[in-house]
Image (spheres, rainbow, N blue to C red):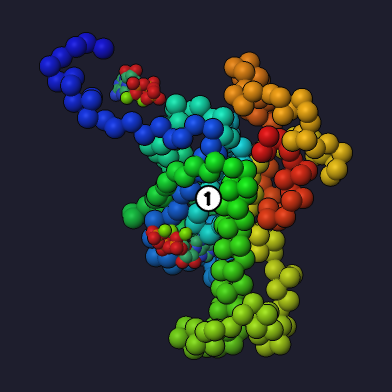
Amino acid sequence: MANSKFEYVKQFEQPDSLLPNTWIVVRIDGRGFTKFSAKHGFEKPNDKRALELMNAAARAVMAELPDITIAYGVSDEYSFVCHKTCALFERRSSKLVSTIVSTFTAYYVHFWPTYFPESPLSPPLPSFDGRAVCYPTVQNLRDYMSWRQVDCHINNLYNTTFWALIQLGGMDGTEAEKTLKGTYSADKNEILFSKFSINYNNEPEMFKKGSVVFRDYELVEPGTHNASMDADNLAEPIQQSKTQSENDRKRRAKARIVVEHLDIIKDDFWDRRPWLLS
Ligand code: ATP
Ligand code: ATP
Ligand code: MG
Ligand code: MG
Ligand code: MG
Ligand code: MG
Ligand code: MG
């Protein structure tokens, strides 16, 4: 680049590299989706097409960015997890967040007509915010994922009951809110079952559990191999060699990306897919 007397302004840029050797989570969230969902007539409490559109956009993001190992989505939000060894954009926060947000938004708009053919987009167009957070341990990362899935469960149970009281029970919003004030999970299950013959357990898995997007390798039978207990593994340096991570990258780029609605709080999901956290 040519030198000029203006070039000093570059030095005003602040470094924003994320802490090395930590799991990076980029969470994006739809801006003003309460209004946006009303404008396009999303079904309440859960519009299946809108969730599938979110999932399609998340899949596309993962296909374009092999550094992302797993993603979890619920409502108008998605969390993308980069492996702790990720070196993409030198781990610069603003680069990572802005690239994920804009790639996601672009695909959301691109796929929109497929999922909502009868409701074309018009301004205000959908947009998303984003942030990056570093988690130093696998336990912290798993607790983060559990936090989002518990949130999904609590909100969905509340919303399912709230909208049943309105749509099937003829209440208005204020009455439904009053009915649910101070209730526990068991009470909401009971209201759904006794008043509306709805067994919450039979609600769609996507609504109850959210969506997990990951690269599918061969499943490991639980108990057959525990990599973290291998003496060899413990002796390995923390930094992966260049070729190893390059191989991993290529393998990831080729793997099939799947969307499932599974429990990510319990160990089973992670035990069966050791490549996600190793
Ligand atoms: P903010 O800009 O602060 O995020 P917001 O209006 O998007 O504001 P959120 O807390 O993100 O607020 O809530 C998302 C809103 O979008 C909720 O009102 C939720 O009901 C609605 N929504 C998102 N996805 C769906 C869906 N698939 N079906 C029905 N409603 C949805
Ligand atoms: P990075 O992802 O690091 O930004 P990049 O390839 O986008 O990589 P930039 O430094 O952003 O690199 O440069 C943008 C490139 O796009 C340049 O090669 C520039 O010549 C080209 N480009 C951008 N806009 C135009 C345009 N309107 N007409 C022709 N070329 C363009
Ligand atoms: Mg928000
Ligand atoms: Mg939102
Ligand atoms: Mg939200
Ligand atoms: Mg440029
Ligand atoms: Mg560029």
The answer to whether one can see residue 60 in this image is no
The answer to whether one can see residue 248 in this image is yes
Image spot of residue 152 (x, y percent): 59, 62
Local secondary structure at mark 1: strand
Which residue is labeled 1 in the image? 78
Cβ of mark 1 under 8 A from ligand 5? no
- Quadrant location, the C terminus: top right
How many numbered discs sit on the rendered protein?
1
Q: Image quarter for residue 228?
A: top right
Q: Is residue 128 or residue 120 the one in the foreground?
A: 128
Image spot of residue 236 (x, y percent): 69, 23
Q: Residue at x 68, y 55 (%)?
A: 265
Horizontal side of 265 relative to 14 (left or right) equals: right
- Quadrant location, the N terminus: top left
Kind of residue sitting beneath label 1: Tyr
Q: Which residue is drawn at 57% across and 52% down?
A: 144
Q: Dot 1: few (<14), some (14–19), or many (≥20) neighbours within 10 Å? A: many
Q: Check the image and report above or below for 223 versus 87.
A: below
User: Farthest residue in the left direction?
Assistant: 5
Q: Which residue is drawn at 64% across and 23% down?
A: 237
Image spot of residue 246 (x, y percent): 61, 19
Q: Residue at x 40, y 32 (%)?
A: 17
User: Farthest residue in the top direction?
Assistant: 2
Q: Is residue 119 or residue 28 the one in the foreground?
A: 28
Horizontal side of 276 relative to 1 (left or right) equals: right
Image spot of residue 88 (x, y percent): 49, 28
